[in-house]
């Protein structure tokens, strides 16, 4: 994952993303919000701990998740980390007072141990060399506070529509999708315990009325995306 690869798409990222997922019948905000909502529901919203929450949005790009993090975690301190200087500039201009935007060197997350309550990666790891995943997840574990949560959302390579979207998306030209059980195993290799896998988004926009059924379908490996999460 190199910054220059994403710098060239920073200014038009949102338009390119919207065009690439048009077949889903949804806009990018739908996918960004459902992930943050899932994080909030899983983590819980106990008032006594919400006030001091520190959240890392890893691979934040232009800050797509920021408004939804503010919506579901209104008292949190949000840090956006990315390898793309240009994307961070765009994000900082969009949300100058809502989040901190920091550069990532591609190896070491530049924060102290035990700093964050939540670390979130929203469809980022397929841009990273697979050989680096376990080491990076160890970095996630290092910067999480005891009891903190790591969440990794990814595209499901078993879903043909998802594969088509990735294959036609300009900024996914070098992407390598990851099977859900492989990602779960990498969490374990990184030292996480009690690792959970959940499949997400089974119905396109035209069938959104059926989405309440998804609450009972998280075990079925045919969804468009999946989430692996664990606590420290």
Image (spheres, rainbow, N blue to C red):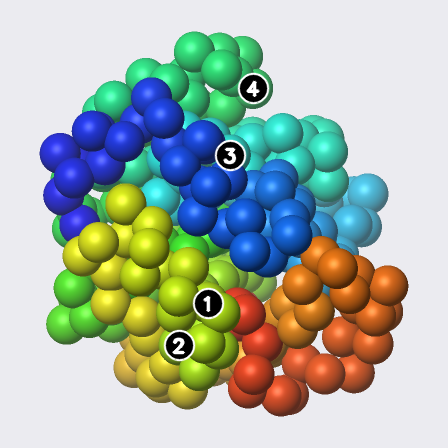
Residue at the spot of label 4: 98
Q: In the image, is residue 45 above or below residue 199?
A: above
Does 145 sit left or right of 125 as displayed?
right
Q: Nearer the viewer, residue 196 or 6?
A: 6
Image point (64%, 88%), residue name:
219
Residue at the spot of label 2: 157
Q: Which mark is residue 110?
A: none
The mark closer to the camera, 3 or 4, is 3
Does 81 sit left or right of 7 as displayed?
right
Q: Secondary structure at mark 4?
A: loop
Point out the tag, 3 or 4, that comes first from the N-terminus: 3
- Residue 187 drawn at (x, y percent): 38, 76
Q: Which mark is residue 162?
A: 1
Is residue 187 shown to the viewer in this render?
A: no
Q: Looking at the rendering, which quadrant does residue 207 occupy? A: bottom right
Point out the tag, 3 or 2, that comes first from the N-terminus: 3
Q: Residues within 10 Å of mark 3 (few under 14, many from 20)?
A: many
Point out the tag, 1 or 3, that comes first from the N-terminus: 3
Q: Secondary structure at mark 2?
A: loop
Point out the tag, 1 or 4, that comes first from the N-terminus: 4
């Amino acid at each position: 994952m190199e910054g220059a690869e994403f710098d060239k798409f920073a200014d038009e990222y949102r338009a390119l993303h919207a065009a690439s997922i048009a077949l889903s019948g949804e806009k990018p905000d739908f996918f960004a919000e459902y992930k943050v909502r899932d994080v909030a529901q899983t983590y819980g919203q106990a008032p006594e701990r919400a006030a001091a929450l520190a959240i890392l949005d890893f691979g934040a790009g232009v800050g797509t998740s920021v408004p939804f993090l503010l919506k579901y975690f209104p008292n949190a301190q949000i840090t956006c980390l990315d390898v793309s200087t240009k994307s961070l500039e765009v994000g900082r201009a969009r949300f100058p007072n809502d989040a901190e935007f920091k550069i990532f060197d591609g190896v070491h997350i530049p924060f102290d141990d035990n700093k964050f309550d939540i670390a979130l990666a929203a469809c980022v790891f397929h841009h990273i060399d697979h050989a680096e995943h376990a080491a990076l997840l160890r970095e996630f574990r290092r910067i999480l506070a005891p009891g903190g949560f790591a969440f990794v959302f990814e595209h499901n390579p078993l879903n043909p529509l998802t594969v088509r979207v990735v294959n036609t998306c300009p900024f996914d030209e070098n992407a390598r999708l990851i099977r859900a059980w492989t990602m779960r195993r990498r969490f374990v290799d990184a030292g996480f315990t009690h690792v959970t896998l959940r499949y997400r988004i089974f119905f396109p926009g035209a069938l959104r009325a059926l989405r309440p059924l998804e609450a009972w379908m998280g075990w079925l490996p045919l969804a468009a995306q999946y989430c692996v999460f664990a606590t420290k």
